[in-house]
Structure formats: structure tokens, C-alpha cells
Image (tube, grey):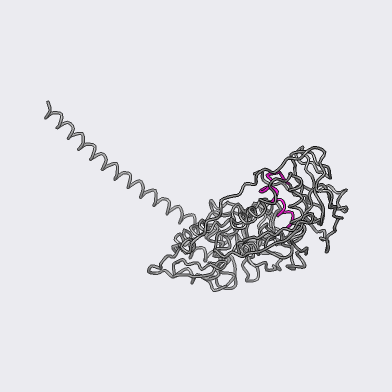
Amino acid sequence: MQKTTIFFNSLMFLLFSVSFSYAQQDYQKWLEDQQKQFQEFKDARDKAFVEFLKKEWQAFQLFQGMVPDKTPKPAEIPKTALNDNIKEITPVPANVITEVRIPKAPLQKTAEFFDWFKPTAKPKQEELKFSFFDREIQLVYESKIKNIMPKKPIDGEQISNFWAEMSSTDYENLLDQTKQLQQKMKLNDWGYCLLLQRIGSNIYQQRENETNIFVWYLLTKSGYDSKVGYDKNQVYLLLTARNIIYGVPFFETNQKKYYLITFEQEKINANQLYTYEGNYPRADELISLNVDNVPVINQFVEARELKFDYFGEAHKIKLKIKKDVINFFENYPQTDYEIYFNASLSEEANYSLLTQFKPIIEGKTEVEAANILLRFVQLAFEYQTDEAQFNREKIFFAEETLFYPFSDCEDRSILFAYLVRELLGLKVIGLDYPGHIATAVKFSTPVTGKTVTHNGEKYLICDPTYINANVGQSMPKFQQETPAIISLDVK
């Protein structure tokens, strides 16, 4: 009986092993077939797109860049008389800020954190080293790529040939490296575009046409809805976005706006261009300008001290600001106000800002705490319009306002809204008047002053640009105006 059992078990084991072996072979064959089919699909997709590009170009009329508000901002801002005897006006006792929650201190990042990515070139590859916001980046790419250049005159066939030649290279390896860098440096969609532009510009030695076609190719292969267009031997990169991009030319097709993108705020003087309708298969992702996380590119931190007085008491706020964040935002496309109001700060700036304000705010009522924050934003910065400071419209992210010596109304409102949310935990909205941006705060208890209603709730106007104004006071010029509301995400 025992021998029979052993024989039976042995036979079953043998049959299982043979079956498992066949199953493995079947699986391997299935996997190879799938990979082959995928490769054939990719090649067929590229081949069809190349043929499409050779014949589908047509002229499109360009619209000039949109302007969100044509009303000029005041060269100087008004002041109201400072009443040293009144810190708040509330019909009922206001809630007290008992605790300001501070995030953990940011970890000191070592050099290894920033130098983790250093691939070595293999045969038929070249190393590329370049600077990305003062950080040296190293990657490798197939040598053939740098020799792919469209001939003049530029037309659809030349751009089609570029696509065909790029598709015959090992572009996937380069694409994989860019994705790793994007993830490590916490780059948003715009940051990814910038990274590709720096790579292309260095591969093609600052030749703009080749760089723009290169960026278009890799963005499209990354799944983004992007195009190129040409006019008079100049190639333009075209992006469609989830957000409005102001101040740059665009054309419309299939109910989408495609913006002519530059990366250094260059002026574009073009009235029409040749491009195509339709998309590369599965390339339908829209560029997002949201800043859920600020980039982590290098470790350079700059210190800044800001001063303000509140009812005779002097305060000094000592900050640490990430220079790579400031550089990253320098030429950021002008977009919807919601993007700026909802953006993050760097860990270093956020921690230093909140820890400095914690002892000033704790123990104060919501209203007095808001007045303190108002006075900080009103007095710690000099006022100057964007035209005077930059010769163009430039909206600051909150970290930029902390860094630059001058700011105007929307910059101060964005910073004030951030402080109210992070320090007081109160709901805040932006107020968009003609030629002016302010804010309004929903306090926990009724407060006397000028209000606006949003979603059935009353918000008290707080103007970070109206010097010495407390909560509930609005500039006389706008007291009869009904502002548009800028909504902020609820935290």
C-alpha cells in the first residue's frame, strides 16, 4: 500500500511538473506574442502618423494673447487712518486661536539626494550634462538623435521626416530618464516641459526649431496633447492646457485652444501658422499648471528678514526661501488666479514662516490675528506694479512675494490668503475688482464690516493692499463694486 502511494505521488508530481513546464512555455510564447504585437502596433501608429503629417497641414489664423483685466492698476495705493485704540469690532466675543499647528521641520537633504542620477553612456550613446536651475543634470541618449535636423524650407514633410527618424531611435530610454527626473524633482507638467526644453536645447546647441520639434515629440510620446506649427521657417511649440494661458497667441480647433509656447517670455509676432488637426493616438492629456508641490531641484536656501509694526509693537519675521523655486517661477505662464491662490510653498519657506508667526498669533482672537496678518502683508513689502518692476504682467506665487522687494495687490492677496488658511484655519476667497484684487474671510463669529456673500455664506472683506485697513474695511473706490469671486480649494 505504501509503495502504491509513493508511486502515485511520484506520478502526480511528474505530471504536474510537465504541465507546469508547458504552461511556462505557453506563457512565455504568449508574452512574446504580446510584446511583438505591441511593437508592431507602435510602429504602425508611428508609420500612420508620419504619412498623416506629410499631407494634413493647413493655415490657421492666430488670435492675440488674452488679457484677464485691462483696467490699469494704481501707481500708488491708498492709506486709511490708523486707529490705535481699536483692534477689532465684534458684536459677540470672537473665537481665540488656541494653537497654530506647525509641520515637521524639513529634513536637510544631502548631496546624494540631488546627485542620485548619473547614468553612464553605452556604445552608440552620448552623455549629456546641462544646468537645470543651477543643478547639473546628467543623462545619456542615442548619438543618432543629435543629427536629426529638418532641412529648410521648413514644411510638413520636413517635420514628418523628423518624426520618422526619431521613431527609429532608442527614444524610450531617454523618455524613461526624463520621467525619473520629473518624479525625483517633483516637477509639475510645466516643469516637465521645461526639462524637455533644456534637454533639447543642449542636444541641438540652442537651435530653436530642432528643440521645439524635439519637445513636441517627447511630450506627444508622453501622452500630452501637443502640436507644432511653422511659418517662415520658424517652428512653434503648441500646447493645450486645462487652464487659460494669458498673453500669448493661440488658435482654436475642435473646441480647444492651442497656445504658442515660449520658455523665456519672448514676444511672438505671428498672425498665422501652418499646423494640423487631429492627434497622435492616445496623446490627449492636457498640460496642467497647478502647483500641488513646488519643485525640489537644488538645496540653495536664501535668508530674508521682514519687518512690520502692529499697534506700536515691532515684529521681525526671519525666513528661509528656496532659490530654485524662485527661479522656477520666474517665467511661469500667466494663468488663472486660482492656480496662484491654491499653490504650495517650499517646505523651508512654509516651516520658517509658520514657526515665526506661531507665538505672535496664538492666544489672539480670530479677528485680531487676521488684523496682524493684514498689517504684515500691508507694511512688510513696498508697493510697485508689475509693469514698473518687470515691464510685463507677472503674478507672484506666495513664495515670490516673500522674496522680491516689491509687490502689488494680487501678490499680497495671494500671500494673505495662504497665511489665513495655514495659521488661522479659516475659509478665504479672492475678490476680483476691475484693476484690483483683494480677499475676504469667513470668521467663526459675526464681525462688523463690509461683507460679500459666496455660496450662501458671508465673508468679511480683508484688503492686504489698503494700508492700515483692518478686517471689514474696503477701499472707498470699490465699496459700490460687486467683485468676481476667486474660489480656493478647501483644506
Q: Position of residue 356 (x, y in %)?
A: 65, 55
Is residue 320 shown left or right of residue 92?
Answer: left
Q: Position of residue 163 (x, y in %)?
A: 52, 63
- Can the viewer see residue 62 in this picture? no
Q: What's the magenta region?
A: 411-428
Q: Position of residue 302 (x, y in %)?
A: 61, 65
Which quadrant, please, contains the N terminus?
Answer: top left
Is residue 404 shown left or right of residue 165?
Answer: right
Q: Is residue 412 magenta?
A: yes
Dominant secondary structure (helix, strand or loop) of the stretch shown in magenta: helix
Q: Choose between 324 and 242: the one closer to the eye.
A: 324
Q: Is residue 87 above or below residue 93?
A: below
Residue at 50% x, 67% y is 137
Q: Choose between 243 and 393: the one closer to the eye.
A: 393
The image quarter in which residue 280 lies: bottom right
- Can the viewer see residue 432 in this picture? yes
